[in-house]
Image (spheres, rainbow, N blue to C red):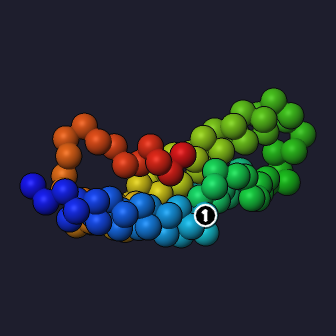
Amino acid sequence: MDLFGMMGKVKEAQEKMKQAQDKAAFLRAEGESGAGMVKVTVSGNRKVLKIDIDQSIMDDKEMVQDLIVAATNIALANIETEIKSTLAQSMDGVLPNIPGLDLNQFLK
């Protein structure tokens, strides 16, 4: 095994990881609940950017709260999928496949 070659690959992987993190910050994902009555948009930084609530449900506070929570959780799951996809594309072929090494942990 070429130690210097491996060190170069690690440096390249670090640079690609940084690029992937920067790119992930601009990702957006949406989640909706209540048949679209509540929509939540989140960023790749896992920040809530926007909440849309259908006016027709505004009188039922508890239902609105439940739908916001559900839509937010769906949006966060969707953005996680997008982040993993972005990371996989960025890191494809940079390092050898090492069983048990989850590069996604570095984007959190």
Dot 1 crowding, Cα within 10 Å, few <14, some 14–19, many 20+: some
* Residue 92 image point, x, y percent: 27, 66
Q: Is residue 95 visible?
A: yes
In the rendered image, the vertical position of residue 50 relative to residue 22, given as above or below: above
Q: Residue at x 72, y 52 (%)?
A: 48
Q: Residue at x 65, y 45 (%)?
A: 72
Left or right side of 18 for 102:
left
Residue lying at the far top in this picture: please name it: 62
* Residue 88 image point, x, y percent: 34, 60
Left or right side of 29 for 87:
left
The residue tagged with tag 1: helix, strand or loop? loop
Residue lying at the far front in this picture: please name it: 4
Left or right side of 68 for 101:
left
Q: Which residue is mark 1?
A: 25
Q: Residue at x 53, y 54 (%)?
A: 79
Q: Residue at x 78, y 35 (%)?
A: 65
Residue lying at the far left in this picture: please name it: 1
Amino acid type at mark 1: Ala
Q: Is residue 28 visible?
A: no
Q: Quadrant of residue 102?
A: top left
* Residue 6 image point, x, y percent: 22, 59
